[in-house]
Image (cartoon, rainbow, N blue to C red):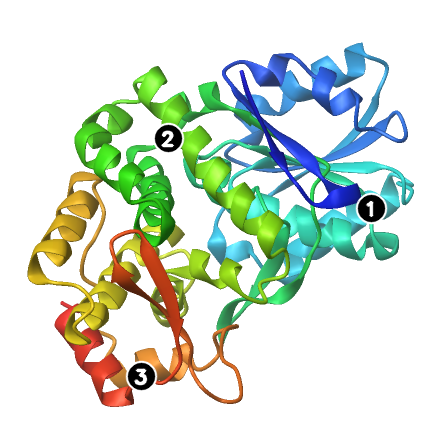
Amino acid sequence: MSILNVALGARSYSIHIAPGLLDHPEPILSCLRLKKVAVVTNDVVGPLYLERLCAGLRGAGVEVASVILPDGEAHKDWPTLNLIFDMLLREHCERATTLIALGGGVVGDMAGFAAACYQRGMPFIQVPTTLLAQVDSSVGGKTAINHPLGKNMIGAFHQPRLVLADTATLATLPTRELSAGLAEIIKYGLIRDAGFFAWLEQHIDALRALEPEALAWAIERSCRNKAEVVAADETEQGVRALLNLGHTFGHAIEAGLGYGQWLHGEAVAAGTMMAVELSRRLGWLGDAELARIEALFLAAGLPVFGPPLGADVYLALMAHDKKVEGGKLRLVLLRALGQAVVASEIDRADIAAAIGARCR
């Protein structure tokens, strides 16, 4: 088992990465203030793993309540969030009750936001079951729901007490969801870890085949990168913004098509290629670097072109991005492989041209 630390002073927590962790609740038990938990999952993950998790907790004398949400990005909204609050109130959960998120990024974001709000803040634990959640969304305390005009626009920073990543759960992950998680893994190589990017080029087939050694290494290295960035900039005042490479374009794809039509990782991959194209047009990347990045995304089973929504639609949706500051759109671009920057003085025509070149 790998154990990493997210260094946030009094709010520091550990990330446990290993197969079979669902059957070993000891790390969870060590975090509980009360012997009562409330588990949030969805109707895809729940039938697979809810009872396993609950059985181990009940066996240790913990009272367990749970709620099963509808699956999918389309349900990352207020009405579905209220299902969590309904359960917490119905089960007489207290501020010291621990909320456990069992599922992918949508479940983790919604459960975390509910935990941030309920009685003005309750502890929560992330038990991510998708590759994307294990390498990205479960770490760092970003919690949110969507709005029709923008993704993750309503939320809070609320750090978990523990992240428990059982890599065995990836065996039941659909191929498309696995590829979506690879998009976030590739991101770390692009923004700050060129050596990891080169390793991914050599091992992408092994990752898609779920080879345990390669998978464990990729998850650990991704989490280590994320933990270092979060420790340096918890609330995204500086370097943490670099983790959003491709996300401003990608969120526009998700909102423009309707949430759930494309998976988040798919939108991020296409959005990253738009950012890469813009970086090339600015003279920061060459054709060879663009070709390498495109080839890796394709090898991961991901799209490298966005849907043809029209540049004006993209730009209108991107205007709602969280990185807009003083009315200016701030984009994460690449100065080189492994070196990301935030740029805010990019000409609108250049952005539109990059979008147009990467839509089909």
**What's under tag 2, amino acid-wise?**
Ala
Residue 14 at x, y percent in the picture: 65, 31
Q: Earlier in the sequence, mark 3 or mark 2?
A: 2
Going 89% across and 31% down the picture, which residue do you hit?
A: 33
Q: Quadrant of residue 35?
A: top right
Contact between marks 3 and 2 (CB within 8 A): the answer is no
**What's under tag 3, amino acid-wise?**
Ile
- Say what secondary structure mark 2 lies in: helix
**From where the camera sits, is residue 262 visible?**
no
Going 71% across and 52% down the picture, which residue do you hit?
A: 158
Task: Calculate the distance from the C-alpha at mark 3 to the C-alpha at mark 2.
Answer: 33 Å
So how many labels did they put on this image? 3
Residue under label 3, please give it: 346
- Horizontally, residue 170 falls left or right of residue 38, namely left
Give me the disc on residue 297. none
Q: Earlier in the sequence, mark 1 or mark 3?
A: 1
Residue 357 vertical position relative to residue 68 in the rendered view, above or below: below
Give me the disc on residue 218. 2
- Say what secondary structure mark 1 lies in: loop
Residue 273 vertical position relative to residue 221 in the rendered view, above or below: below
Residue 288 at x, y percent in the picture: 8, 55
Residue under label 1, please give it: 122
